[in-house]
Image (cartoon, rainbow, N blue to C red):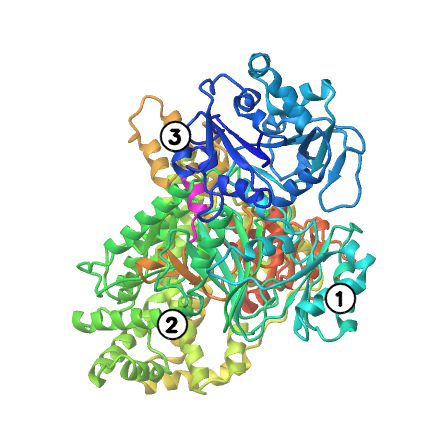
Amino acid sequence: MSTKPGFVILGAGRPHHGSEHVALRSAGGDARVLDWLIGAFTFVRPAVHFVGGYQADDVAGKYPDFQYVLNADWETTGAAYSLLKSPLHEFTECFVSYADILFRESLIKAMAETEGDVVVAVDSHWRKRFSGRTTEDLIRCEKVFTHERLVTRLGADIKPELADAEFLGCVRLGERAISLLASDRVTLSELLRKASLSELIEWLRVRGMHIQAVDVVGDWAELNAPQDLAHFVLGTKAQTLQRLQGMVTRSRIEDQVSFTVAQWQKDTRSVLLRINQKFSGCTLVVRSSALSEDGFAHSNAGAYTSILNVDGASQEALCVAIEKVIDSYPDRDGYNQVLVQPMLASVLASGVVFTRALESGAPYYVVNYDDETGSTESITSGSSRHHKTLVIRRDALQDSPNLPENLRELLPALREVESLLGYDSLDIEFALSKDGLHILQVRPIAVDHSDVQVTDDEILCLLAQAQQHFVRLQAETPFCLGSSTIFGVMPDWNPAEIIGTKPSPLAMSLYRYLIMDEVWATQRAEYGYRDVRPHPLLVAFAGHPYVDVRASFNSFIPASLDDSLARRLVDFYIRWLIENPHLHDKVEFDVVPTCFALDFSKWALRLQQEGKFGGDDICKLREALKLITVNAVGRTDGDFQSIKSLEQRFDKIRVSQLSPIEKAWALLDDCRRFGTLPFAHLARSGFVAMTLLKSAVATDILSQDEMDDFLASIRTVSHTLTQDSVATASGKMEWEAFVAKYGHLRPGTYDITSSCYAADPERYLRPLVEQQSGGPAHVSSGELWQLARARFCNALVDEGLSFRTDALDAFLRTAIEGREYAKFIFSRNLSLALEQIVIWGQEIGLSRAELANISLGDILGFRTGAVTVSDPVSWLRQRVSESADSRRRVCAIELPPLITSAEDFSVFTYPSSQANFIGSGQVSARCIDLTQDLGDKDVTGMIALIPQADPGYDWLFGRGIAGLITMYGGANSHMAIRAAEFGLPAAIGIGEVAYREFVGASILELDPNNRLIRIIR
């Protein structure tokens, strides 16, 4: 009989998932499950026997030093039968384990030290060992029942009662138990042929064996699902870092001293001594490591205190810091921990990485970092004004040229941690110093992605197609000059602002039809620019709308310029935008001159110095832009009259007896011919007017007060709305007439799911009336402008633009007022068309949300009979379903606001002002600015605006807010994580400019799915 204990591994059965034998599966890095099992017995050095069946030869080939026993009947027998096949009679004691579990050496030591005929490993936390455990798994798992004071709880000094627990699949058999089992193995094998190991234990208990149990309190894993290994390795903050420290090679984890609250309270002196011995004289960081932190279900990110820059030489400072951390814990659980580490010095960059997109679980590394302040917590606290967001596709190359030079070490380090854990949904805090990359924290993403209906392969396939599409579009076309092109969501007709970055198929197709396919180019050609037709302006990549910047810039080249100069100008403008990507939403102000202005000299200087254009080239452009400007002044009144034609035709269509679908088509056709084209002209003229005025201020021809005085005398639709609100409040205008005039407005002009004001006038329009108790606002007299306008006109005449003062004044007013008026009028056609489509949809059983997933082409095909199927309605429903599936994939994809190379589909950095949207719900609600302390304010149902994503605003999540907007903060900030956990629509880190704009609003629409924030009122 052997003096060494035996270790029998039961590995005969087929795995629950997959085909690879579970014992050979990766368990972090290069380690397999069997390596973990053997590692836990290092101090015992047992004789290992493996009972095999399924793929037994594969196991033997990898581990030839084991003793092997074959269970030929493995498909029809249980674990007890496999155990009885092993040479139990050779041992006085024997450990037995299933081959698909992981546990620590501490468990085996505890079992070896526990007296009993049979010592079983159990888990009293089995019901809540990890979040998302299915009912099926809870029913399937093996249970054992123990009696009071028979349980040793690892890491504790007490032996609590244990009514029932899950059996791990690990047991130590003493000499009496082995003798009983070995006495008649043949008979027992048949008796217990299909019995589990837990049933065998019960059989031993009934026959008088003394049973003891060791409770692992959740600290083990059964490898049934991909996250099981991560559940095993990831514990509290302190435990996780300690376990990973000896495993990582591509990053560093600093040494630590960790202790429980109970240990601190019981023997403070001993804890301080340990810290002093480990970190004598160092500057330290004292960090929280609570049991309720960093879990799979709830992160509690930033909820507890961490103290930086603690003087390690001062026991008083250390005690104060530790007590502050402990005091931040909401419960008095003695098992909560505190973690002490050396404070990092000379931090070059720091941040947080989600190894999957927080909201969707899409295959991206999302890195929010700060490489300017030197702080290790500026990102997690949401206080950084310098945060950057780097998005890396999970299959990106580690040497991608788009990766910032200072973060080159990050991607290999992230992939190593994922490999070690066998899990890829992690939240990793890091810092970069002169000593290398430091891992500060690793925890699971606390958002459950199990119900995500989109696969990684689907997303990566769409991105690959988009990348190929980008490459194909680089070829020069006959009427669109330039050696290459780039794409943006904000230049020119900025789809990001109008329909969002992830619009519905109906919204995108309407925008294409009404403007982006042909109208935009027709307007430019008629205005005096190059004719680029039939080139569309909008291009979609993986369902995301982009403006073709080369087409846009071509359409801003005056038609009088020759192709050679035009091509050179386009290439220079594109290069300038690539070098200055922050200008992507300001191209007509800072990238391309589209009309003449009094400060044209700034453009001339750039073209000469940066573009190496000669004086003759610049002179040609200057004179050509003058022609554009003169043409604008001459044509604008006619464009304004055209929009009035649409107004007259609208009433005829509205009262007609056409069917809903025919009426919708008539409204849209009229909108395109008589609405959006003159609107495009007026919008261009409005830009010319404002450019002339601003250039006059820039060159000191006008003062700011004089320009403001003119603008205050303009009578736009907004002014009219205010006047009509006052008239309705005073009874001079009927409420019904007020609703009829303004009821067609809707927050999302092209969005069929966005209700028009007339659908709920009490919500949208009534407050406008109720607020108008003081009469109309003060109207400028225009005296300053009257004195200045001749001076302004003469300055333009001096530049060779022969304008009369009255004609110039009329142009400025008509252009600026007309732009808003034209949109007001054409959107009436569009709004009624959408409502007619809703009525048509109701007739065939389709909701607004379903209609949003149909393109205009499908609707028109249904209308004209082009859909030649036996059941057109069923065909349409199928299209809705397919489109909804496609949109789920589109919404999970991340793309940059400006695409300049094929590599941008793999790695890109968002501008610092790019908001981080959380959630998929759309909400319209009153907003409240919480810049001031308004802790007692009722914020129920409101969109809360706060300056930074700071944990101090955690109280908001218990106040029933409808949405959250922050000025600062990134995708990985505390508030972003909390919003995702609560499923709360949020926009984190929108930037100072946008924040100031939204703070002044009364009602906002927040649409994270579409990356939109709109002011409703």
Query: Considering the image in quadrants, where does the C terminus appear?
Result: bottom right
Q: Position of residue 682 (x, y in %)?
A: 39, 63
> Is residue 795 shown above or below 385?
below
Which quadrant would residue 664 be assigned to in this image?
top left
* Residue sitting nearer the eye, 211 or 643: 211
Q: Are marks 3 and 2 in contact (CB under 8 Å)?
A: no
Q: To which residue does mark 3 refer?
A: 57
Q: CA distance from mark 3 to mark 1?
A: 54 Å
Q: Position of residue 592 (x, y in %)?
A: 33, 72
Q: Position of residue 135 (x, y in %)?
A: 62, 28
Q: Residues within 10 Å of mark 2 (few under 14, many from 20)?
A: few
Q: Amino acid at mark 2?
A: Asn
Mark nearer the viewer, 3 or 1? 3
Q: Which mark is residue 272?
A: 1
Q: Residues within 10 Å of mark 3 (few under 14, many from 20)?
A: some
Q: Amino acid at mark 1?
A: Leu
Mark nearer the viewer, 3 or 2? 3
Q: Residue at x 69, y 49 (%)?
A: 292
Q: CA distance from mark 2 to mark 1?
A: 54 Å
Q: To which residue does mark 2 refer?
A: 580
Mark nearer the viewer, 2 or 1? 1
Q: CA distance from mark 3 to mark 2?
A: 62 Å
Residue 488 in sight from this viewpoint: yes
Q: Amino acid at mark 3?
A: Asp
Among the two numbered marks 3 and 1 on one chain, the one whose residue lies closer to the N terminus: 3
> Is residue 678 shown above or below 121?
below
Q: Please provide the residue range marked out in magenta.
A: 886-894
Q: Are marks 2 and 1 in contact (CB under 8 Å)?
A: no
Q: Residues within 10 Å of mark 1 (few under 14, many from 20)?
A: some
